[in-house]
């Protein structure tokens, strides 16, 4: 074998090795990004989809889908209105826990819609919420499960109380902790 052929082979091997090294670094960065972005939802996705690769494909697809949405902050008036309605839901719990939970479910959907999330089936809504609100999406799932049990007339008052607590965690995260004018001045 002449020197030129040997040099060409070594060059090809070096390029392939470099390509594999770059691919490996990119994959690790993507995995780290998704773990950071989704927090506890990353682990749930790994469990649900049967491993990190499948979970990461799903989570990346969620990110891409949600980027296409027009997610927007609430106006000051919307913020006030949703806050008032939530206070009414919590007050209603004392006299009618079942209705309060049904109203909390409805109000969370309305808030999601006002922020720009599409209203598709529950699983898709939860997946969409997990992109920007990964810390509270499990609250949404838990609340929804109890709400379904409630519609069947099988939820205890304690379960209904838990549902309201779960809905509140998601509601507050979606509402954002500060009204819009305070967020703008804090920047």
Image (cartoon, rainbow, N blue to C red):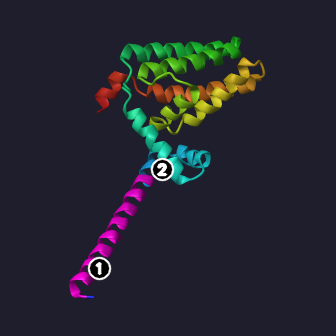
Q: Is residue 10 above or below residue 135?
A: below
Q: What residue is shown at x 25% (from left), y 78% (from top)?
A: 8
Quarter that holds the N terminus: bottom left
Residue 181: name its quadrant.
top left
Q: Position of residue 68 (x, y in %)?
A: 37, 31
Mark number for residue 35? 2
The C terminus sits in image quarter: top left
Q: How far across and how far down the image is residue 15, in percent?
A: 29, 70
In the rendered image, the vertical position of residue 126 relative to residue 14, given as above or below: above
> Which span of residues is magenta-colored?
2-31
Name the residue: 37% across, 17% down: 76
Query: Which is nearer the eye, 87 or 159?
Result: 159
Residue 10 circle label:
1
Secondary-structure class at tag 2: helix
Residue 137 vs 107, above or below: the answer is: below
Label 2, residues with CA under 10 Å away: few <14, some 14-19, many ≥20: some
Give the image location of residue 2, x and y in percent.
Answer: 23, 88
Q: Residue at point 45% right, 25% down?
A: 117
Element type at marker 1? helix
Q: CA distance from mark 2 to mark 1?
A: 37 Å
Answer with the quarter of the image where residue 48 lies. top right
Magenta stretch encompasses residue 8:
yes
Residue 149 left/right relative to 37: right
Give percent across and percent down for residue 105.
59, 20
């Amino acid at each position: 074998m002449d020197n030129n052929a040997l040099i060409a082979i070594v060059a090809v091997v070096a390029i392939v090795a470099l390509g594999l090294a770059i691919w490996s670094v990119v994959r690790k960065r993507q995995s780290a990004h998704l773990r950071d972005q989704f927090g506890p939802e990353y682990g749930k996705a790994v469990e649900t989809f049967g491993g990190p690769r499948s979970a990461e494909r799903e989570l990346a697809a969620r990110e891409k889908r949600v980027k296409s949405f027009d997610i927007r902050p609430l106006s000051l008036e919307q913020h006030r209105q949703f806050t008032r309605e939530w206070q009414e839901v919590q007050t209603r719990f004392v006299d009618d826990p079942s209705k309060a939970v049904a109203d909390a479910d409805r109000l969370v959907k309305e808030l999601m819609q006002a922020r720009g999330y599409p209203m598709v089936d529950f699983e898709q809504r939860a997946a969409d919420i997990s992109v920007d609100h990964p810390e509270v999406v499990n609250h949404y799932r838990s609340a929804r499960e109890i709400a379904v049990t409630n519609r069947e007339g099988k939820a205890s008052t304690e379960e209904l109380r838990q549902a309201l607590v779960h809905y509140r965690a998601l509601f507050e995260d979606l509402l954002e902790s500060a009204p819009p004018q305070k967020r703008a001045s804090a920047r």
